[in-house]
Every structure is written in structure tokens, then in C-alpha cells.
Amino acid sequence: MIKIMLSDSITQVKGVGEKFAEDLATLNVHTIEDLLAYFPYRYDVFEIKPLGELIHEDKVTIEGKVVYDPSLTFYGKNKSRLSFTVEVENVAIKAVMFNRAFAKKQIKSGDTITLTGKWDAHRLQITVSIYKLGSADNQATIQPMYSVKGDISTAKLKKMIQNAIKNYAHEIIELLPTSYLEAYKLPGRQEAIKTMHFPANRVSLKHARRRFTYEEFLLFQLKMQLLRKMKREATQGNTQHYNPDKIKDFMNLLPFDLTNAQQKSLNQILSDMNSPYRMNRLLQGDVGSGKTAVAAICLYATITAGKQGALMVPTEILAEQHYQSLTDLFGEKANIVLLTGSVKGKKRKELDASIENHDVNIVVGTHALIQDDVLFDDLGFVIVDEQHRFGVKQRRRLRDKGLNPDVLFMTATPIPRTLAITAFGDMDVSVIDEMPKGRKEIETYWTKENTFERVLRFIKKQISFGEQAYVICPLIEESDKLDIQDAVDLYNQLQEFYADEIEIGLMHGRLPTEEKENVMKQFAANDIQVLVSTTVVEVGVDVPNATIMVIYDAERFGLSQLHQLRGRVGRGDKQSYCILIADPKGEVGKERMRIMTETANGFELSEQDLKLRGPGDFFGKKQSGIPEFKVADMIHDYRALETARNDAQEIIEKNMLEEKEEFYQLQQYFENNSFFTDKLD
């Protein structure tokens, strides 16, 4: 007799023929194991509660006695409405069913009936989705709901899963060590799979879900930690022998003291530089939290180690800003050059030669840094600012300019801890979560469109004091689909309102790069007082003179994006303002506006944003790197995520997969799953 393996084709399951196997393949179910792991996406709980406990518009289950025979009416084409009265707790409840005319013959006056559907507390009415003649006593209280399509019915899918469990459940291998199952009071894998498909009660389902939540997180975190270990071991012999005394002297010359958060992040980075492995670290901090100061000290450390540093940023104007601020900080302690697409001809050749000859200590630049003709003598430290604006290949090309240089990625987008653990699991993360002393908090207000003229008069008043303003809106041109302000129309409105008194600029993503940067230069030089723009200014040049940020149709932006836009002002010593013009229709939109006016901390906002929007929308689904978990939910199950991460770190650091017998199945799991192809970049 041939032994059936869980990795065998789904056609081995009784009742699954070639046609049904083809249908199941559309659900990504190919093997017996795939079928067993095809969990319900939700569970309908049929629990009869007293009428007084039912919540308006909730899905509920009630049981009662039919008072009159149902009445049936037809409307439209092949549409029907069946209605009848049910007595529940001596109260007359109206039941309505659509497009089930056949039920009229089944439901009779005096019958006991169990109804599930949407509850209308105001009308004492239930819109029925499921009904069953008789009492609910003999009905399963929990109904698994599967995602199905095509010719696959839920009933047939459940039958196939039942057959698979009956005949092959004994082949299910336990992945988690016994000590972990006992410590966390988790059911075994075989029992948990059965419960996920056929739950006996809420308690057993809760524990089964808890088990798979932890398992999914642990497997993912182990994958990340193994990947991190492989990257580290591939870059041994990379210690930077910097001079701590010179770094202290340099820091003493700075015109400011580091905050505790800056100091902590700096210590973590310097420790990485001093280790024999290549650094792969993300430095995240709010706009204005002082990431550049930390980066400058690290660049100086690499110079004292006799190496070169590079800082790559997404735009020329940002490169110029960083070049200027680093030149001011370093004075004559380093030779810093600016390398952008604007540097051409003889000047470019001379610059390339000085970089290759190590006459240059630090190169600040745009994508020009990764061109083939840019060669470093000894690149030791690479910084990528606003790392999400560069592709993986671009970041890799810069890193490959040196022999395993330490790499620091920087972002001004505060990332919730749960997402940082998942999306950047193979990286170390440093966080600057406090602002420098003396920085004035930006005053944030929410108002409606009918006050816009008042807002414009306020802008005019502040401009008379020499200040400047941004006015942001979501679209570039008018759209019939969306009733929201567009940049071109808004620009024209402001031109008309201010006449020739104030210079208005317009910027959006469709402008050529040169034109965009030219507009930003004019704004930075105060040749333009009001800049109407789409979100292309979200990350960009510092304009300390800009004190007002007006965001039109603010309800169309996420909290993190609103916070990023707000961070464009408040860069100088003047009081700054953020004005949100919004008329949100839903509760989520109103909640966003309320949170924005009450919260200035970017990390708190990012956590709230994650709860409101979910992980896919937070980063953008295309390049988020966020895994799709079947059972686990990063937001609601964050404690399990933290636990799994800590366990994964301990397992890899202590080499438990290879050295402890109870981890054998986990080790086999990773050996049999090729996770690491093309992952070492």
C-alpha cells in the first residue's frame, strides 16, 4: 500500500476529481496540506440572546413562534419579499426575507423557527439571511465561512476538508516544541486544525486561533532572524576602527546637545560600526527630530576610521540642503562634495577623480551617486535618506560601491512598532522619539470649507510679517468622479483672491523634475510666498520661513501623511500653524481630524493610523513587504507578535534549531522551504 503524504496532490482526497482539483487550484489549494490549511475567513456565531441584549444593525440569532402564515409579494424582475411575524419573549417581531418565495410553503403559523439576520431595533424587525425550522438546540452554534469562487460550494468544500481530516489528520506534524506548547497553553497542531474547521465551542476556537497566530508569527520571525544571521555572516571582518576621542571633541563643538533618544540611536549605530559585521539599520524619527545630526556624527566616525562616507537623497534640492548643513557642521574637518545630475562635463570628471583618489571624505548626492563612473577608494558608511523613495536595486548599487560598507537607512515616516517588527524584521531599528528642546509645537486646527476666505485672510496677515504658506490638495486636475479641490483650480482661485499682492507658485507630480526643483528654490528664496501643491512636498526642502500649512480636503489623507505634511512647517523659531479644511462624512474621517488636532507625536499618530487604515494601506500594498497572514492580525495580536519575535531571536542566537532535539521539526520546515533565494541583498 502506497503511503499518502500531506504534500501529495489534492486528488488523493476522497471525492476530489480532476475538475474539482482544477477549481481548488484557483484558491491556491494544490495539496492535501493546502486543503487542511485553508481556514475559514470568518465564523458566524449563532448564539440566541435575550431581545434586550441585541444591538441595532448587528447580525443576531433569535428563536420564536410564527404567529401568522407568511405573506409573499413580488416586485421587479424575479424579485420577492416574504414577511411574517414571530413571537419572541411575548414581543411581536417582524421577519423579512428577500428572494426566497419557496419558503412560503415551508413556514407555517405555529411553527418554532430560528432566524439569523440583521437586527433593526427601531422597527423590531429582522432581515433574515438564514432560517431553520425548529429550535436552535440541535444546530451548531459556530458556522465557519470559507472564501469560495466559481463552481466550488461551501458545502462541498467542507465535505472535502472533513474527508481530508478523517483520513490524513494523523500525518499532521507538530512544528512547535513541546516546551512552548506547555508554556503558552497552546493546543497541538492536529487538534487545532480540526478545531479551526469544525469548532465545538468558542473557547476551543479561541485557543486554536491563538495557536496559529503564534505559529504564523514565529515562522515569519524565524525566517527574518535567519535571513539577518546569513547577511551578518556574509559580511564578517567589517570592523570600523573609529577614534572615540575625536568623536567626543566633534560633538562638543556642535551648537546643540543631543536628546536622550538621539544619544541612544547614536550609541547603537557606533556599536554596529565597531562590530565585525556590516550594519543594516533603519533610523526612524519624526520630521525635525534630529536624524541628520546623528548621521553627521556617524559620518565623522567613518572619517576617523580612514574611510569615506556617502549620503544619497531623492532630490537635488534635498541634496543641496544636506550638503549645506553638513558643510556648516564639519567646517574644515572634512572635504564634502555635492554630486547631482546637474554636475556635468569637466567638473564632473574632476569630482569623480577626487572621490576615487580619496581626496573627498563625504559625498552627498542623488541617484548620480550610483552611476558606473562614480568609484570610491574605500567606502565605509552609506546613508540612504527617505529610503522608501529608492528601489532595492538602487540601494544595492550604492552599497556595492564599497566592500560591505555599513548601511544606515533613514525615514521621517514614523512606523508603528508592529509594522517595523514585520516589514523590517531582518534589520535593526533605531528610533528617535523625542523632539529637541525649545521647538514650538505646531498649532493644528480643523475647519470647514465655508471658512476658506477667513483662512486666506489669515495667510495674508502672516505674509505681511514676512512668513510663507503651503496650500495642499489631493488632485492635480478636476475630476468628475471626486468632488474634491484640485491644485490647478485652487492655484487660479488664489491668484484671483490675492491679485498681484502675493506671489503664488504651483507644484505637482506631473511637472518635470527640473521645473519642480526650480519652484521649490523660488519658494525657499521667498520669491514665492504661497505654494499651492499636491503631496510632492511631503518630504523635501526645509523652508524655515514657511509657518502655515493648509491642507484642503484633509479627510482624503491618512493620518501619517497629514503629519508628514504638517512637518513641512515649524522648521524655524516662529510659531507655525496647520489648518485642516475638511468635511468628512464618515466617523473614521471625523476621528482622523480629531486625532490630528489633539496629537503632535508622530509615533502615536502612526499607531492610530494603523488601527484606522490597516497595514496594507499604511505602506501601500505594492511595496509594503508586509506578509499576508492567514490567521494572525498584526494590529490586534501585537502581543503575540512581540512574543514570537523575542522567541525567534533567542532560538537563532542560541542556535537552538541545530542543537536542541525538540526544535528538529522547525529546522526541517526551514530546510524544506526555500525562503532565501535572492534575499541576501
Image: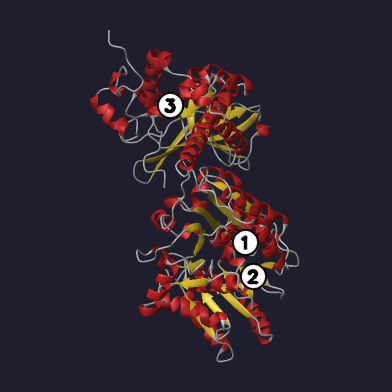
First along the sequence among labels 3 and 2: 2
Task: Check residue 297 in the rendering and tell me which mark sits there, or answer none.
Answer: 1
Q: Nearer the viewer, residue 106 or 196?
A: 196
First along the sequence among labels 1 and 3: 1
Mark 3 or 2: the one toward you: 3
Amino acid found under the numbered disc labelled 3? Tyr
Position of residue 47 in the picture relative to residue 162 (left or right): right
Q: CA distance from mark 3 to mark 2?
A: 53 Å
Q: Residue at x 49, y 48 (%)?
A: 616
- Where's residue 624, x and y in %? 47, 50
First along the sequence among labels 1 and 2: 1
Q: Is residue 328 visible?
A: yes
Give the SS element for disc 1: helix
Q: How many callouts does the rendering have? A: 3
Q: Residue at x 44, y 59 (%)?
A: 390
Pointer 2: what residue? 579
Pointer 3: what residue? 669
Q: Residues within 10 Å of mark 1 (few under 14, many from 20)?
A: many
Amino acid found under the numbered disc labelled 1? Ile
Mark 1 or 2: the one toward you: 1
- Where's residue 80, x and y in %? 41, 39
Q: CA distance from mark 1 to mark 2?
A: 36 Å
Using the rendered view, name the quadrant where residue 38 is placed: top left
